[in-house]
């Protein structure tokens, strides 16, 4: 026996062999869980998730940069000549060092929070700039614009621009140079021509860094959003194309078979003489006609040319005429746009509710209402029948389960309110497209 045939005949081997589809699903599931997204993620949600992940990655890089600064700061405090030069002596210097250590750790612990992470990081980064200004301005000789550590200001400008690529958000890094100049004047230091040139040089570099990094970050974000939107459009196009192909196949195959069944039943009906046989053939013909009408509705929904309100009202009228049930249909609000999946879910839930009312409830009246508002669409089906206990669904009855699964898939709300002897009220509400 060939290995390929053995694999087909051995169920255990076939089940244990992962398919490419299972690998893709596992990879998608892993990414969605890591980014805390749902299966129905929108392009805007995906872009926001990417921007949040980008921020968290850069904020972690800031934390590691702070660790290096803290290491150098410890050396400044430990070496007497360095601590004397920068005026970092006594309890105040050690208190400042440990304060920086504590807020750095606190910042790292809240980095992943969508809002607190950004605010805490920004505040601690401003504290870093303040500490930098103090260290640069402290020395009486060789301090301020003459400090060999002045290039640190450019590093903080880069960090601000990477984390908060907006001109106003980077203001603290720019103001730090002006504060250093002001401190020099307050400490009665003379500003030389070389120091003025140094100030202009650093200001120019700061503005260049802000412009370049802000521009690149914005272009990167725009390009990512375009790619995400393009991927969504390609997915929708693939879905529409596949639906159109299935619609053609169903129309040409199943539709033709049902049409042939109707024609044959009409021919046999003309030949039959027995009344009971004629009634059975007539029932068969009616079932085939109802099936082809259902098929036509499904094909319309698949091709996205289905008018939901009119389709629901027509179905209610047809169902009421066929079953002799007293069904009232009402619509409120202006129709809103819905996706094909949402339209199909609304229609199937209406079908299930009416079918359950006919089979189990024996109502005297059924009320169907379709409500549209600015952001949601709600289908309400209420009857005055026998009612039931929603918590005790009989074994083998999957209608309620199917409705709940459709609701979960669309992110909709399904409420079933019923009790024995009190009728049933089913409410299905879902968001409309903007």
Image (cartoon, helix red, strand yellow):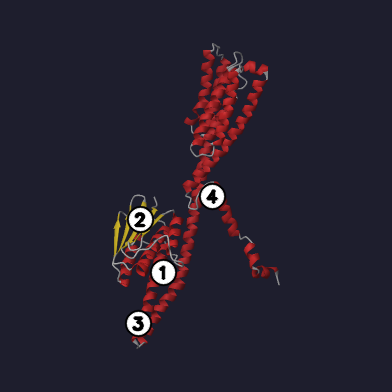
| Gap in angstroms between the C-alphas marked 2 and 1 | 25 Å
Relative side of 190 to 351, left or right:
right
The tag earlier along the polypeptide, 2 or 3, is 3
Residue under label 1, please give it.
Answer: 295
| Gap in angstroms between the C-alphas marked 2 and 4 | 29 Å
Label 3's element?
helix
| Gap in angstroms between the C-alphas marked 2 and 3 | 40 Å
Q: Which mark is residue 279?
A: 3
* Quadrant of res 21: bottom right
Dot in front, 4 or 1: 4
Choose between 5 and 350: the one closer to the eye.
350
Q: Which image quarter holds the N terminus? A: bottom right
Residue under label 2, please give it.
Answer: 378
The tag earlier along the polypeptide, 4 or 1, is 4
Counting every numbered tag in the picture gives: 4
Q: Residues within 10 Å of mark 2 (few under 14, many from 20)?
A: many
Choose between 45 and 175: the one closer to the eye.
45
| Gap in angstroms between the C-alphas marked 3 and 4 | 57 Å
Asked whether the residues under the numbered discs 3 and 4 touch, taking CB atoms below 8 Å apart as contact, a structural biologist would say no
Label 4's element?
helix
Dot in front, 3 or 1: 3
Q: Residues within 10 Å of mark 1 (few under 14, many from 20)?
A: some
The tag earlier along the polypeptide, 3 or 1, is 3
Where residue 283 sits in the image (x, y, percent)? 36, 78
């Amino acid at each position: 026996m060939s290995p390929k045939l053995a694999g087909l005949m051995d169920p255990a081997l076939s089940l244990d062999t992962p398919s490419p589809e299972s690998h893709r699903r596992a990879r998608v599931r892993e990414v969605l869980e890591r980014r805390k997204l749902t299966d129905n993620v929108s392009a805007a949600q995906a872009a926001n998730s990417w921007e949040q992940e980008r921020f968290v990655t850069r904020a972690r890089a800031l934390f590691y940069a702070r660790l290096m600064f803290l290491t150098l700061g410890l050396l400044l405090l430990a070496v007497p000549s360095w601590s004397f030069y920068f005026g970092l002596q006594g309890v105040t210097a050690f208190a400042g060092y440990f304060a920086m250590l504590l807020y750095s750790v606190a910042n790292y612990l809240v980095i992943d929070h969508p809002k607190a992470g950004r605010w805490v990081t920004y505040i601690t980064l401003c504290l870093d700039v303040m500490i930098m200004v103090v260290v640069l301005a402290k020395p009486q000789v060789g301090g301020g614009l003459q400090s060999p550590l002045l290039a640190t200001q450019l590093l903080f400008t880069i960090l601000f621009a990477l984390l908060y690529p907006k001109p106003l958000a980077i203001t603290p890094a720019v103001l730090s140079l002006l504060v250093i100049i002001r401190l020099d004047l307050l400490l009665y230091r003379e500003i030389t021509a070389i120091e003025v040139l140094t100030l202009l040089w650093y200001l120019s570099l700061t503005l260049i860094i802000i412009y370049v990094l802000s521009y690149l970050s914005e272009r990167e974000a725009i390009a990512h959003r375009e790619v995400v939107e393009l991927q969504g459009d390609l997915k929708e196009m693939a879905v529409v194309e596949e639906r159109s192909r299935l619609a053609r196949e169903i129309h040409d195959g199943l539709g033709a078979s049902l049409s042939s069944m109707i024609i044959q039943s009409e021919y046999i009906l003309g030949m039959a003489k027995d009344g009971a046989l004629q009634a059975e053939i007539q029932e068969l013909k009616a079932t085939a006609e109802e099936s082809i009408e259902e098929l036509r509705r499904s094909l319309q929904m698949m091709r996205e040319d289905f008018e939901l309100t009119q389709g629901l009202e027509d179905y209610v009228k047809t169902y009421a005429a066929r079953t002799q049930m007293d069904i009232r249909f009402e619509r409120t609000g202006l129709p809103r746009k819905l996706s094909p999946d949402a339209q199909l879910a609304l229609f199937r839930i209406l079908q299930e509710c009416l079918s359950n009312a006919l089979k189990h409830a024996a109502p005297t009246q059924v009320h169907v209402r379709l409500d549209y508002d600015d952001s949601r669409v709600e289908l309400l089906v209420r009857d005055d029948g026998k009612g039931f206990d929603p918590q005790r669904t009989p074994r083998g009855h999957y209608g309620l389960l199917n409705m709940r699964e459709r609701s979960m898939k669309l992110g909709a709300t399904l409420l079933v309110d019923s009790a024995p002897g009190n009728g049933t009220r089913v409410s299905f509400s879902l968001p409309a497209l903007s």
